[in-house]
Image (cartoon, grey):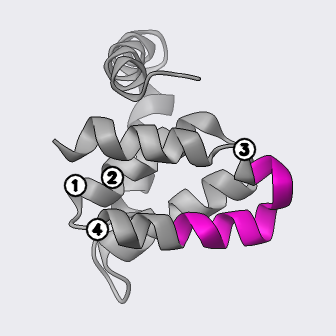
Amino acid sequence: MTDPREFWENYRQEIKELKNISPATVENYSSFYAKVMQDGVLSLKTKELIALAVGLTIHCEHCVILHVRGALKSGATPEEIWEAAQVGVAMGGGPAFTFLPLVKKAIEEFKS
């Protein structure tokens, strides 16, 4: 299982390096993502919880880590994160269920 905090630090560094290799790709995607993930009709917190559920459904370990962190930073409680995770499992079945220990570990790592 990926260590959430270690992944986050490595991910940030890798994105910085990718920006040197392909600045247009990183900048354009980052701009699009920032626009989508700002408060609108849905709050950022709600969007992060949706993204977490989708990440679980598609079995994306990195998405789980990024969106547990994002949900906590946007004010979600561990209980809200668990409920969103349960929606992801309901939609993704057994393979999504296997990611729940990662959700737990990411909550513990980023809650502090």
Q: Provide the residue designation for mark 2.
A: 70
Q: Earlier in the sequence, mark 4 or mark 2?
A: 2
Q: Splitting the image into 4 quarters, where does residue 63 fall?
A: top right
Q: Residues within 10 Å of mark 4 (few under 14, many from 20)?
A: some
Q: Earlier in the sequence, mark 2 or mark 3?
A: 2
Report the residue that reaches farthest toward the left. Answer: 112
Secondary element type, mark 4? loop
Decide if residue 110 is on the left or right side of residue 42. Answer: left
Q: On the rendered image, what quadrant is the N terminus found in?
A: top right
Kindly identify the residue that appears in the image at 33 percent across and 62 percent down. Answer: 78
Q: Residues within 10 Å of mark 1 (few under 14, many from 20)?
A: some
Give the alpha-carbon distance from disc 4 to disc 3, as whole Å.
22 Å
- Residue 12 % position (x, y): 33, 22
Secondary element type, mark 3? loop
Give the alpha-carbon distance from disc 2 to disc 1, as whole Å.
5 Å
Foreground of the two, 15 or 96: 96
Which amino acid type is shown beneath numbered disc 3? Thr
Q: Provide the residue designation for mark 1.
A: 73
Q: Provide the residue designation for mark 4.
A: 76
